Image: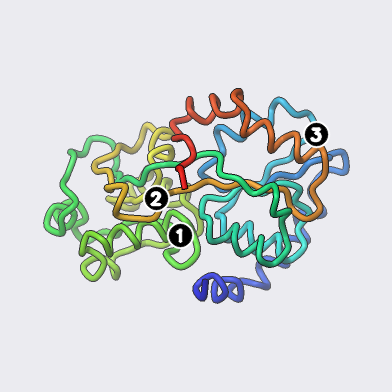
Amino acid sequence: MRRLANALITGRMMIRVFLVWFLLSTTASAQVVVFASASLKEPVDRIAAEFPDVTVSYAASGTLARQVTQGAPADVILLAHIDWMNYLRDGGFVQPQTVADFASNSLVMISPSGGDDIALTGSAIADVLGQGRIATGLTSAVPAGIYAKEALIHLGLWDTFADHLAEVDNVRAALALVARGQAPIGIVYATDARVSDAVQIIATFPTNSHAPIRYTGALTAQGGDSGAAFLNMIAAAQGQMVFSEAGFLPPVPH
């Protein structure tokens, strides 16, 4: 949790600027504001389309959690790492009885389209990487980056590649770097790789190489009945089908 506390301090002024913009730009007619991890965009957009008065804001889970602690007007929050949800719950920023997992995911290594599958070994990765960098989320705060660091440590690869990372502020930004050819390798979720024809999966990290990728949702302290209806839809059979069709896995038993 220390790394989360440190991350909360970083960028505090940027968060305040964002909040001013958000409050000014969110339409007065929106009754439900949903904050969601960037990797959830496709299924959450589909579910939100069923609700006429829902506004969704996407960003990295750590960024969203910080915004909620700063008073951002969210009713529902959907995160990709349990540590950030635990932080919000411990601080009284979410309604604890509403916290629940709703999906999971796999961690993969990607390259621009046209590459070959590789083994997750130092030599194989170095051959593809060349003089480039591995794009992933911030390893101190962005869930995809946190999982990536855990996996590289587990596989004995962290010391080799820690200085060859391009750390960005959310997983979709990492995906974009690879899709544009600005990074020869990226570490993202399997569902992210599905949304771009410009990338392909070249390796899948073993599930035991990192903590389970748990997507967890909750009502914020200010969330009401309309937010609860949206959250319930995600957990219901219809919402779960949407997530399955987008490539997400069922919640991890725990």
Tell me which numbered mark, 2 or 3, is placed earlier along the sequence.
Answer: 3
Q: Dot 1: within a 10 Å radius of its alpha carbon, few (fewer than 14), some, or many (20 or more) residues?
A: some
Question: Is residue 101 toward the left or the right of residue 149 in the image?
Answer: right
- Residue at which label 2 appears: 177
* Residue at image mark 3: 53
**Is residue 4 placed above or below 191 in the rendered structure?**
below
Residue 179 position (above or below residue 128): above
Asked whether the residues under the numbered discs 3 and 1 touch, taking CB atoms below 8 Å apart as contact, a structural biologist would say: no
Q: The residue tagged with tag 1: helix, strand or loop?
A: strand
Could you tell me residue 133's position as x and y percent? 29, 59
Q: Which of marks 1 and 2 is in front?
A: 1
User: In terms of sequence position, does the residue under pointer 3 or pointer 1 come before the other?
Assistant: 3
Nearer-the-camera pick, 166 or 239 = 239
Marks 1 & 2, CB-CB < 8 Å contact: yes
> In the image, which disc is placed on residue 168?
1
- The residue at 60%/71% (across/down) is 8
Residue extending farthest front: 254
What is the C-alpha distance between the residues marked 1 and 2? 9 Å
